[in-house]
Amino acid sequence: MQRILAQSGKEWKQFRRDPLSMWLAVLMPVVMVLLFGYTLSLDPDGLRLVIRDLDNSALSRRYVETYIGAADFQLIAWDSELAVEQALETGAAEMVLLIPPHFGRDLLAGRPAQAQALIDGADANTALILRQTASALNASFLARENPALAPPVRARIRYWYNPGLSDRRFFGTGALGMVLIFFPALLGAIAASREHELGTVIQAYASTLTPAEWVIGTALPYVAVGCVELVCGYLSGAVAFGYDLPPDPTAFLAASVGYIAIGVLFGMWVGHATRSQSISIQAVQLGVFLLSLLLSGFLAPLENIPKAIRWLSYFIPARYYVEVVRDALLRQGGWRTNGLDVVILLGLAMLGFWGVWSQVRRMRFPD
């Protein structure tokens, strides 16, 4: 144990010699959590709307007011023929609402009335939201004007765990999964590759450290730094986005420590394999951050990923940790709901330890 602590002390002294790196290691995760939480959103706001009312009746005006009163829309033109023609072509609006003549007369006569919504489909997600919003507003207008047309069964929807459907809470929790895999992996990669670049790895030959002791002693300081990043990232997110620890946080904490260890050990493995700080940093950016961002379910459900590449997500630790952290901080879950994910993360940490140990087990590094 003393030899492990001595190796950890040596790594810590090297790390703290660069105060800038220390501050960046703590502050950048906080910045990334806040940036992910505040900048990412699946729900577009202030959708620009152009209206052309060719009927100009009392009913058509009330129909128009249904759209204007919706918080999702921002009216930029009304009854401007030029705007209607050019709005979608120039990108000035996402939707154009056209109300034909005799709209009100047909409604009063009990005949089907038509209105046309022209939607910019370049952004498929926004277009789908606009279609759903237009359908809901149309149904609301009909039910208000003619209660007989209202559906006989009306669903009362109540949202659990995230009542306000806040994207900030959703992405703010998942951002911990991006932060706690990227920065620890970066620290581990730099530490291992620096040993080769400076030639200090030769000290391992002269010491009495076993390969396991060397790996543990080298990784411990960076796992500790990762735990500090966890605390800072959680506190900043809790203040900004309003999430809380579950009543039993042990599953969340165990998964977090295992996840941080995975990042550090993978970074060390990359650093020893590349022996270059610049190459190891690029490898971590591509092999850790990018894959975790795209294949973890952080940005979109895994079911949206094509089956041909979805299987790769089973090898991405972030897939399991993002589920754990969202379950813990949003649903207040624990071992019962995500125990298997925690076990998988701890198993991947052991696999990462074996990978680095296998590199240094003979304590000999080729020239």
Image (cartoon, rainbow, N blue to C red):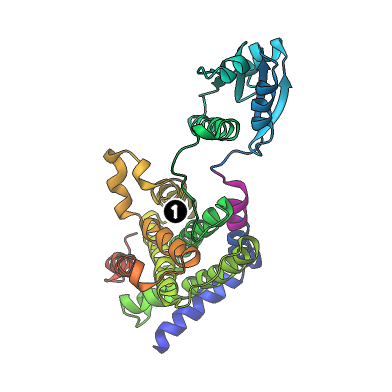
Task: Give the quarter of the image for residue 235.
Answer: bottom right
Residue appearing at x 60%, y 72% in the figure: 16
Nearest the eye: 94 or 96: 96
Quadrant location, the N terminus: bottom left
- Residue 181 shown left or right of residue 310 in the figure: right
**Which residue bears the numbered disc 1?**
280
The verdict on residue 313 being magenta is no
Percent of width and height locating residue 58: 70, 22
35 is within the stretch colored magenta: yes
Quarter-wise, where is residue 137 in the image? Answer: top right
Q: Is residue 81 visible?
A: yes
Q: Which residues are magenta?
A: 32-41
Q: Please name the residue shown 44% across and 44% down the image.
A: 153
Seen at 30% across and 67% down, the residue is: 340
Dot 1 lies on which element? helix
Question: Residue at the location (50% across, 36% down)?
Answer: 150
Task: Say if residue 133 shows up in the picture.
Answer: no
Viewer-proximal residue among 144 and 276: 144
- Quadrant where the C terminus is found in the figure: bottom left
